[in-house]
Image: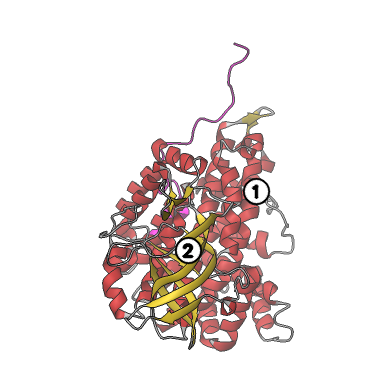
């Protein structure tokens, strides 16, 4: 025996991830979802358990395996997942992380669903992709009542069955939009759709990215004679046979390894028209909007994991005669990471409330602009935040044995998926130009905090001046979106968070002395008070 293991933090397991997250607990109550707190504590204890965390790690170290053919040479196009992944996604579905807000609509339903989604995604982000797509497919199905009647009960089920087959009581949905030549420019898609004359269509072409290829059905875009149209493509046909769905390969991703992403080809594949022929983008856009919102939730979940792991390490490790958390330079970094996480959580839950069934016209207008603004800013802040938290763990953070290396690789997908930075910034400009009521509703929310801080007031006025100067709008788009995002985050914190949090955020993000890296905070800020909330 050459040494003892000393001064290493104990495992962070068997905790209530909901109960320990003060800003999340407060936000759930603020936005009319206090009725869900018992269930959320139960989810918090589940995802914080040693067994769930072990499954999260195993699902990412035992990667999915593609089987294109069986041993007799028959085409099967199946992806084999480790049982740990099935346990994770089954638990998420059983808790309603996918479609609970649709199944039981009420004030705060989307807030409760967002909190549930975030708790699961905090610990294992890969499964959140099919969970999100299933949630987001529900409004698109309304474009075709016959398809909605057939599929909606299965989407609302809390059962999970990962195998292909018929009949199944539940279903998960995927989405496949981009192609090799087009990427975000989906109007450049070349996949063709031909009317079979029997109520179905035949699709021929490819998709460059198809996540969760073992989903039961997919929404995708293809060119018909009337133009780009939306189709529902089932993996299994009504007669029990397999639809033609040729998985070419699995992507070697930067991020999570638990969920497979693939390239697929269609050759006379059966699909069903969803919505009006030639209006495919209009049909699928609500699904895209919902998945963009889930990108905000996913990033906020990742920020929470980063803060929780960094604080745990700093509270249990000593250096140079004191706990890391008590050393002023580290205290400032941890508090700044917590500020970023709290701002993202506050924004995510406010947006979730705006998506409930009781949302009026003003809330619809608010969420149109605010979701795009937040998707751009919060998701872009994710990777840098994860890196800074990883650095707090030192060498441990840089190893795959701890979760922050995996989080660092995962956070960029939220900014890339469903519209990368420039695409989202241009969407913000589109909303401002075509839907001016969204601007009014956005500032109605922001202005609720007017007078609470002079620096905030000055920032809001400067942002409004930018809106009145449309020249060279595209070149200035990113700056404008950043200004809008910070105005919204600061407003929400000034309205609802303690002064120690909100005033420090305003000074650190809007003030003249703001830094470009984490840990640059006002000298008199109550750093310990900020940290205690997390």
Q: Residue at x 47, y 55 (%)?
A: 23
Q: Residue at x 30, y 80 (%)?
A: 145
Q: Residues within 10 Å of mark 1 (few under 14, many from 20)?
A: some
* Magenta-drawn stretch, dominant element (helix, strand or loop): loop
Q: Residues within 10 Å of mark 2 (few under 14, many from 20)?
A: many
Q: For numbered disc 2, what is the local secondary structure?
A: helix
Q: Using residue 141 as the reference point, say whether residue 187 is left or right of it.
A: right
Q: For numbered disc 1, what is the local secondary structure?
A: helix
Magenta stretch? 1-29
The residue at which mark 1 appears reads as: 387
Q: Residue at x 61, y 66 (%)?
A: 377
Which of pointers 1 and 2 lies earlier in the amino acid sequence? 2
The residue at which mark 2 appears reads as: 294
Q: CA distance from mark 1 to mark 2?
A: 22 Å
Q: Position of residue 173 (x, y in %)?
A: 39, 64
Asked whether residue 498 appears in the rendered view, the answer is no
In the image, residue 6 lies in the stretch drawn in magenta: yes
Q: Using residue 151 as the reference point, say whether residue 49 is left or right of it.
A: right
Say which quarter of the image contains residue 417.
bottom right
Say which quarter of the image contains residue 5.
top right
């Amino acid at each position: 025996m050459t040494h003892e293991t000393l001064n290493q933090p104990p495992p962070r397991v068997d905790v209530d991830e909901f109960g320990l997250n003060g800003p999340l607990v407060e936000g759930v109550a603020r936005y009319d979802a206090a009725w869900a707190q018992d269930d959320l504590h139960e989810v918090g204890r589940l995802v914080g358990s040693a067994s769930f965390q072990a499954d999260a790690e195993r699902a990412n170290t035992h990667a999915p395996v593609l089987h294109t053919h069986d041993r007799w040479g028959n085409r099967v196009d199946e992806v084999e997942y480790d049982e740990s992944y099935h346990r994770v996604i089954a638990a998420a579905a059983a808790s309603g992380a996918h479609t609970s807000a649709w199944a039981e609509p009420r004030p705060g339903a989307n807030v409760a669903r967002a909190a549930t989604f975030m708790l699961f995604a905090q610990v294992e982000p890969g499964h959140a992709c099919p969970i999100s797509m299933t949630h987001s497919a529900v409004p698109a199905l309304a474009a075709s009542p016959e398809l909605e009647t057939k599929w909606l009960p299965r989407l609302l089920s809390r059962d999970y069955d990962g195998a292909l087959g018929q009949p199944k009581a539940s279903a998960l949905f995927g989405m496949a939009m981009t192609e090799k030549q087009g990427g975000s420019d989906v109007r450049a898609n070349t996949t063709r759709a031909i009317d079979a004359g029997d109520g179905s269509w035949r699709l021929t072409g490819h998709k460059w990215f198809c996540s969760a290829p073992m989903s039961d059905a997919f929404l995708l875009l293809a060119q018909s004679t009337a133009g780009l149209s939306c189709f529902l493509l089932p993996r299994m046909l009504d007669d029990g046979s397999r639809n033609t769905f040729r998985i070419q390969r699995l992507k070697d991703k930067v991020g999570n390894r638990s969920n497979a992403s693939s390239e697929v080809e269609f050759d006379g594949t059966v699909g069903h028209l969803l919505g009006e022929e030639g209006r495919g983008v209009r049909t699928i856009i609500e699904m895209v909007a919902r998945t963009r919102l889930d990108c905000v939730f996913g990033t906020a979940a990742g920020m929470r994991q980063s803060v929780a792991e960094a604080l745990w390490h700093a509270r249990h490790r000593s250096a140079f005669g004191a706990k890391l958390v008590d050393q002023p330079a580290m205290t400032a970094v941890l508090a700044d990471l917590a500020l970023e996480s709290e701002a993202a959580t506050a924004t995510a839950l406010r947006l979730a409330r705006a998506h409930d069934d009781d949302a009026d016209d003003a809330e619809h207008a608010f969420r149109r602009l605010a979701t795009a603004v937040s998707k751009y800013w919060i998701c872009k802040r994710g990777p840098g935040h994860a890196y800074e938290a990883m650095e707090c763990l030192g060498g441990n953070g840089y190893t795959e044995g701890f979760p922050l290396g995996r989080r660092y690789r995962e956070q960029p997908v939220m900014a890339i998926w469903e519209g990368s930075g420039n695409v989202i910034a241009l969407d913000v400009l589109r909303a401002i130009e075509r839907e001016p009521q969204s601007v009014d509703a956005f500032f109605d929310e922001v202005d609720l905090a007017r007078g609470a801080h002079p620096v905030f007031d000055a920032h809001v006025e400067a942002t409004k001046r930018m809106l009145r100067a449309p020249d060279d709008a595209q070149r200035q788009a990113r700056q404008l979106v950043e200004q809008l995002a910070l105005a919204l985050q600061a407003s929400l914190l000034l309205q609802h968070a303690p002064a120690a949090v909100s005033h420090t955020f305003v000074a650190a993000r809007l003030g003249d002395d703001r830094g470009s890296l984490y840990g640059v905070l006002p000298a008199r800020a109550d750093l310990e008070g900020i940290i205690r909330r997390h």
